Image: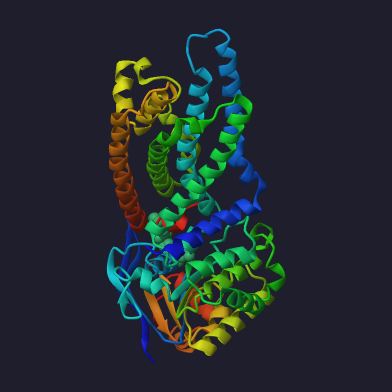
Amino acid sequence: MTKLLQVEGLTKVFGSVRAVDGISFELMEGEILGLLGPNGAGKTTTLQMLLGLTTPTSGSVSIFGLDIKKHRQEILAKANFSSSYISMPFALTVWENLTVFAMLYEVKERKRKITELLKKFEIEELRDVPVRRLSSGQITRVSLAKSLLNDPKVLFLDEPTASLDPDIADKTRSLLQEIKEERGLSILYTSHNMKEVEELCDRVIFMNRGKVVAQGRPEEIMRDFAGSSLDDVFLKIARGKTYG
Amino acid sequence: MNLSRILAYTVRHLYLYKRSLPRLMEIFYWPVLDLLVWGFISIYLMRFKGDLPNFVAFFIGALILWDILFRSQQGISVSFLEDSWSRNLLNVFISPISPAEYVFSLLLVSVLKLIFASVVLVGLAWILYSFNIFTVGMDLIPLVANLIIMGWSVGIVTMSIILRFGQEAEVLAWGIAFLFQPVSAVFYPVSVLPEPLKTIAHFIPASHVFEGLRAVISGGALPLNEILWAAGLNVAYIILAILFFTWNFRTIKKKGLLVKVGE
Ligand SMILES: Nc1ncnc2c1ncn2[C@@H]1O[C@H](COP(=O)(O)OP(=O)(O)O)[C@@H](O)[C@H]1O
Ligand SMILES: [Mg+2]
């Protein structure tokens, strides 16, 4: 497997807060990596730095072997992002929104691609509905469809299932799994839902107060922390325990 | 610069106007009301002050041109606000569109909006007051171009400030142009201003444009020095505006504020 993304000594200081504190990790091709940790651990800030939306205080990010500082446009053409905290122009319909983004990514065979994604996320019947009238779960699915428009090689997802009901969340996970297997997509995934992470992620990184406190395969981490589940590990980490 | 990405984002705004009747109305609402009120006031005043020739033409011409400046600025700031309100900016800024391309697409939107509004205004002015702006002739081109570019500078600066300070600064999108109105000498010559304001007016491109407009409407030639002044100031201001935007964008990325826009 080849390295798709490499992060070294990544640090972000906001005033007196060390939001991200010298973290290093990598993401392999075709891997789903979970980024976990309590609120304020620094997960979102990390993702924002990987996307070049926030400038790191120090450290480096390279994606596809390219430095994000110098090759941002090039990298972003082959990457994508979705999150429950962003949305899309409310007045536009689902179809119009996806058309605009397909144009931004210069997608070939735009209509076919959009139709295919609508079907995948089971939102065909919403195609002519303005985003304003969608539920938050439906917006999440449209946003996920958007994030696959450009056939990305790497997908960054910040709590993508936070507003989905268990049924749709489950479907979404299967779909991500399927897409990953179909085309070896790599995913960096943050979530609070430990069951979801156990099911989906090949490997996880636990963060707390800006630092990586554990990383490895879910079962390794459970063993190291003597936890019966990732939930259990999460609680131990959130309450300040470290290895052992 | 990638033209297809710029056009893609212009399409986003065209969809908006296709989808939203209130937004479409907003393009025409204020200018039409202004035109009615100011037009009738000037007709009324004409009855008393017969010695000021072309009174109606002065007012209506100034009004239409002022609206062009206002639209040009507002087209940028409000379009940007639409993205901020719909929490769409992250989608935009993680796509391959560069900040410069994004700004360009907004410039394009602003021009389209002001063309729509102007067509209606020009038509109405002709029907209601028999005022044909095209009597100004080719001189209209440098006058209007200078107003559009001044509007862009103000619009880019406004957008930068909103990006940086969020919701509290949103009111600037509608209000900031009016800050320049008194010193733009829209409805009166610069000569009526008190000395300190005269000096300020000298550095406002629009004041030179409106002086030029009055000269032409009074039947004179377009004063070339006024146009050159306006153009020179505009070149300087648009460069400053772009530098300000770039610097501000870098600051925002340092402070991690892009994620928080619209909150
Ligand atoms: N733009 C910002 N300015 C100042 N502090 C910030 C900013 N963004 C995040 N923080 C702080 O950095 C820390 C990490 O936040 P975040 O990355 O959002 O955590 P998470 O996503 O893991 O919940 C928190 O203490 C948060 O308050
Ligand atoms: Mg977060």
Compared with A62, B184 (above or below) is above
Instruction: Tell me the residue at 61%/32% (across/down).
Output: B124
Does residue A91 appear to the left or right of A216 in the view shown?
right
Q: Nearer the viewer, residue B57 or B99?
A: B57
In the image, A182 versus B209, the foreground residue is B209
Identify the image quadrant of residue A220: bottom left
Question: Residue furthest toward the right?
Answer: A125
Q: Would residue B263 be seen by someone viewing this image from the given angle? A: no
Colouring chosen for the image of the structure: rainbow
Tell me which corner region of the image, top left, top right, bottom left or bottom right, holds residue A35: bottom left
Count every numbered label the image shows and give the total: 0
Q: Is residue A92 left or right of residue B69?
A: right
Residues B46 and A103: in front is B46
Q: Measuring 32% from the left and 39% from the top, which residue is drawn there? A: B234
- Quadrant in the picture for the N terminus of chain B: bottom left
Q: Is any atom of residue B141 visible in this view?
A: yes
Name the residue rendered at 58%, 57% in the picture.
A89
Residue A154 image offset from top left, x and y in percent: 45, 79
Residue B251 at x, y percent in the picture: 32, 53
**Residue ranking furthest to the bottom:** A1
Give residue A243's position: percent from left, percent from top: 39, 80
